[in-house]
Amino acid sequence: MAKPKLTFCCQTCGTLYPKWTGQCTGCCEWNTIVEEASVEALPPSRYQGFAGIGTTLTRMADVTLEKEFRLSSGLQELDRVLGGGIIMGSAILIGGDPGIGKSTILLQAIAHLSQTCKVLYVTGEESPQQITLRARRLGLPENHLWLLADTHVENIIKHVQKEKPRVLVIDSIQTMLTSLLSSAPGSVGQVRESAMQLVNYAKQTNTALFLVGHVTKEGHLAGPRVLEHMVDTVLYFEGEQDSRHRIIRAVKNRFGAVNEIGIFAMTEKGLREINQPSAIFLSRYEQPVAGSIITASKEGSRPLLVEVQALVDQSHAGNPRRLSVGLDTQRLSMLLAILNRHSGISTHSLDVFLNVVGGLQIFETAADLPILFAILSSLRNRPLPADLIVFGELGLAGEIRPVPGGQERLKEASKHGFKIAMVPQGNLPPKSMDGMKIFPVQALKEAVACIEHLALLPTA
Ligand code: TYD
Ligand code: MG
């Protein structure tokens, strides 16, 4: 085979180079030059694109649709993040820290799928023996589970063209390499080319494809950003290694809602799904403690009760620290500024630490008000009532804005025995709720006065 022609291309401005250099002379950016195969070297299937080549124009009204066909992975929580099951011909990328359970969940899913259709698990990291050992330990059905230990994309495609599995797992995309490029596996160019060929294969043959992706220290998928554009669905594992709970979140989904989460527990029998997760993110104390508050969060389509903890302490450094686990640190700084400006409560000489119990990450703004109350409670060293639930978004003018799904949040809280709620005025239910006293608030000042009264917090 003739050696494929290679070029190096700046990913920012597109300038071409015959060899790699550190800085692009076209746009002066550093580390943007990546090896690429030139078009002549590519197999035809590669430049036909994902959607295939159309020689005529199509009127939308004439497009015929096949019935959307979804396979169940056997794990309801995984199906729900995927939008109701695995769509044939879709490419799904699963990212997460090492050891969080990516290989385990895919092995469990594919073992279930192997009962009804042909599946292939391609491993570039573990040997077939290791995978078999794990499958046996988990008691998974193994009769129809096919394994392939290979990292050459061209080889893999040759095999799958012959065997025609309906579901293909690649563990992991960073170990794959294509002979089109000479760079090492895991490099940006290799990951992109390998993924491109595999995704193309999946689209053209209507195969469901799972790609396992490594993440960097910062928690982003390693390799090119374009990887996330190439696939239909991007799932991320969240959760702390030392906590039992594992959360899978859809950050992109062409076939379902984003930010939908699936919740699992890692057990000695693999990942077990948790179908009633609403109270698992609460730590239970005998007595209420200062700095802790429960909020009703709505990640995806279902409400979850989540405990947010704050610790405020005298700062001994010139720059007080603002740290948060599971919440946005930038937003925390903004909230502290709002607290100072609109309630006159200053934290400029204090360190502020925030934590969401159970390793969950909260991205929604409904946590704004509870965060400030947790901080206030820690600052004054007074616990908040144990049966209090709070949610609401804060604006820069100190106003409290309604959040989506207010009624569902309140219902979930009521179901778990919460009796006092503080909510944005716009989220006040039309009818009063049995057993729950609801305080609607419109501005931060009013909310702080209300909580000072409710929790008997001493005024500053
Ligand atoms: P794994 O799926 O190999 O992680 P990844 O592919 O994301 O790197 O998960 C391995 C971790 O999960 C390992 O730390 C052990 C733990 N584990 C269990 O606790 N129970 C089990 O049944 C299995 C299979 C793994
Ligand atoms: Mg793995």
Image: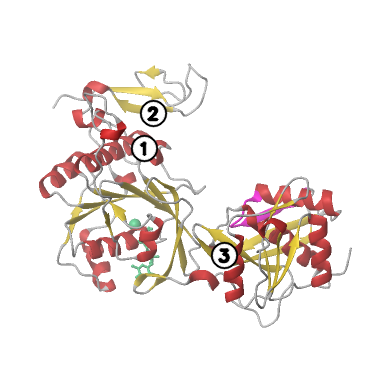
Classify mark 2 as within 8 Å of ligand 2 or not, answering yes or no.
Answer: no
Q: Quadrant holding ligand 1? A: bottom left
- Residue at 68%, 74% (x, y): give it: 436
The residue at the point 82 percent across, 59 percent down is 446
**Which mark sits nearer the N-terminus, 1 or 3?**
1
Disc sitting over residue 266 in the figure: none
3D distance between C-alphas at marks 1 and 3: 46 Å
User: Which residue is labeled 1 in the image?
Assistant: 187
Q: Distance between the residues labelled 3 and 2?
A: 49 Å
Amino acid under disc 2:
Val
Q: Is mark 3 on a helix, strand or loop?
A: helix
Asked if residue 357 can be seen in this view, the reply is no
* Residue 42 image-quadrant placement: top left
Q: Name the residue under label 3.
A: 408
**Label 2: element kind:** strand
Q: Nearer the viewer, residue 380 or 373?
A: 373
Residue 321, image x, y percentages: 72, 52
Could you tell me which quadrant the N terminus lies in? top left
Foreground pick, 70 / 406: 406
Q: Does 173 appear in magenta? A: no
Q: Mark 2 points at which residue?
A: 34
* Label 1 secondary element: loop
For the residue with label 3, is its CB less than 8 Å from the closest atom of ligand 1? no
326 within the magenta span? yes
Residue 161 placement, left or right of 422:
left
Q: Are marks 2 and 1 in contact (CB under 8 Å)?
A: yes
* Mark 3 residue crowding within 10 angstroms, few (<14) / some (14–19) / many (20+): some
Measured as percent of width and height from the top left, residue 334 is found at 72, 47
**Where is residue 237 shown, x and y percent of the image?**
44, 57
What residue do we see at 22% from left, 47% from top? 207
Instruction: Specify the segment rendered in magenta.
Output: 319-329
